[in-house]
Image (cartoon, rainbow, N blue to C red):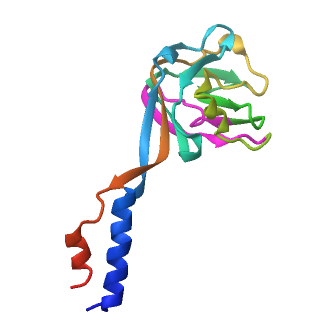
Amino acid sequence: MHRSFRQLTVLIVATTMAFGAGIGITEVQAELVEIPLPELAGTYPLAGYAELATTFPFLMDPANIISVSLRVTGTLTAGTLTCDGFTEPWPMDIGGFMPDDTSGGWWWASPGGLMTSGPFTFTAEFQGSFSGPATWNFLGDETGDLIFSAIPAPIVGLCAELESVEPTAVVDEVVLILDMVSTVPIRPLVWGTTKAWYR
């Protein structure tokens, strides 16, 4: 479809202004960023069912975060729990928590109790706490804190703990996965492209 001389003139002027001002065009797209946390590898549970905390660097804009997930890889040795006269699997709860000191809320990620012996890998997305809203604004300080836990699931009922075998896990890898929004420059318009619009 042919355009009028006035339409072509307006486009040429606008394009010339864009080149003169150095204005580029950007495309918004998603980008996955992985932050390995090798210091969390090891055998769990820790003595006294302790949690392990670590601080990680974050040099991006937290406003660009779409979601954050936790990937954990390792090997589980299932436990058994003698409870109320019955023997059943004793799950192991593995997950991570991140406090948001800007809102007082928490982020947490866990797949639920693991019960099957052998290698495992899971990826769980962080969810906001029930106690209050959580944001990613705390990452604006260029660091974040993750509290990692791998402990036998809490015992409920009249259980003979002395006859039970608690589960253990060897954690090989812990990784934070951030789904981020990023902007990518696109090649500026050239005269050939402009002409093509009017053919």
107 relative to 80, above or below: below
Please identify the quarter of the rendering in which residue 8 is found: bottom left
Residue 93 visible to an observer of this rendering = no
Front residue (pair 102, 99): 102
Tell me where residue 80 appears, x and y as whole percent: 59, 21
What range is drawn magenta here? 107-130
Is 171 situated left or right of 63 in this image? left
192 relative to 199, above or below: above
Tell me where residue 88 appears, x and y as whole percent: 61, 28
Q: Residue at x 46, y 18 (%)?
A: 38
Tell me where residue 150 appears, x and y as whole percent: 59, 21
137 relative to 30, above or below: above
Please identify the quarter of the rendering in which residue 6 is found: bottom left
Q: Residue at x 74, y 31 (%)?
A: 101
Please identify the quarter of the rendering in which residue 149 is found: top right
Q: Is residue 145 magenta?
A: no
Q: Residue at x 22, y 78 (%)?
A: 195
